[in-house]
Image (spheres, rainbow, N blue to C red):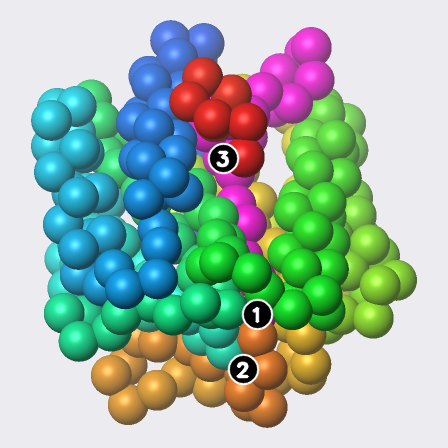
Amino acid sequence: MTGAGGQQSAKSILVKTADEIKIMQDANQIVAETLSMLLDITEPGITTFELDKMAEELCLKRNSVPAFKGYHGFPSSLCVSINEEVVHGIPSRKRKLKKGDILSVDFGVRYKGFYGDSAVTIPVGNIKKPVQDLLRVTKESLMLAIEQVVPGNRIADISRAVQNHAEKHGFSIVRQFVGHGIGASLHEGPEVPNFVSKGQTPRLIEGMVVAIEPMVNLGTHKVQVLRDGWTVITADKKVSAHFEHSVAVTANGPLVLSARDNFTDK
């Protein structure tokens, strides 16, 4: 789940021990397994409520609890955002996926006192070429950002990697919502914007864990929140993509805690 811009800056940056990072990796692997399942079962005709139910069931089976359900009043375990919905979409029994949709799924768990958080955007059947390009570039921007997660770099290096790659391909970066630190709280310092802002940003040190989550739009970067108080959509109603990994800063380089390698190559 994303952090809103400006809300995380006052939160402390907490460094984790090796044992704590191992617990966070276990938590994130529950998230990875769940997202891999959703990648496999998402198809035209399924409802977002069904996806939410299956994600929660798997989460509980793995002795963890959904991180988002009840968080500031959010009603569900999954954030499911379709097409022009950017983030924080609420699952519904009435919403069935259709061919040509894209579905951004954001999921988190709490396990042994620590959080995992990751997101993926899933094509539903065949999607148009510009939308294929959007998904590819957004995922690539995440991978390029992860490469910057090394001791001595700054948060701005992560932000620059996302912004440069997305804008080079003609897409825009959501600015109202950002990535975040993560650990014993779902949202910790520092903020991790997907764009470079003025001022010096925190330096990365070994033991930090950050949730990097590019939100990239086909059209304008501007967004608005619907009357439900949660669902964020693009102002021009053009589609948006969202990918996220939780990544630890280690002496050996970035450690992607939520990598799905054990479950799928998607």
Magenta part, dominant SS? strand
Specify whether residue 172 is in view.
yes
Q: Which amino acid does label 1 sit on?
A: Ser
Q: How far apart are marks 2 and 3 (CA)?
A: 25 Å
Q: Where is residue 131 in the image (x, y as percent from the top left)?
A: 65, 66
Element on which disc 1 rests: strand
The mark closer to the camera, 2 or 3, is: 2
| Residue found 65% across the figure and 47% down from its top | 139
Position of residue 118 in the picture relative to residue 167 (left or right): left
Q: Which amino acid does label 2 sit on?
A: Thr
Judging by the rendered image, the residue that carries numbered circle 1 is 240
Judging by the rendered image, the residue that carries numbered circle 3 is 246
Q: Is residue 256 magenta?
A: yes
| Residue found 49% across the figure and 58% down from its top | 125
Judging by the rendered image, the residue that carries numbered circle 2 is 234
Element on which disc 3 rests: strand
Q: Distance between the residues labelled 3 and 1?
A: 20 Å
Position of residue 11 in the picture relative to residue 110 (left or right): right
The mark closer to the camera, 3 or 1, is: 1
Within 10 Å of the Cα at label 2, are there few (<14), some (14-19), or many (20+) other Cα atoms?
many
Specify whether residue 13 is in view.
no
| Residue found 27% across the figure and 70% down from its top | 96
Residue contact between numbered discs 2 and 1, judged by CB atoms under 8 Å: yes
Q: What residue type is labelled 3?
A: Ser
The stretch of residues the image draws in magenta is: 240-259
Which quarter shows the C terminus?
Answer: top right
Q: Where is residue 118 in the image (x, y as percent from the top left)?
A: 43, 42
> Which of disc 3 and disc 2 is earlier in sequence?
2
Q: Position of residue 161 (x, y in %)?
A: 79, 48
Q: Does the magenta stretch include residue 159?
A: no
Position of residue 11 relative to residue 36, above or below, is: below
> Which of disc 1 and disc 3 is earlier in sequence?
1
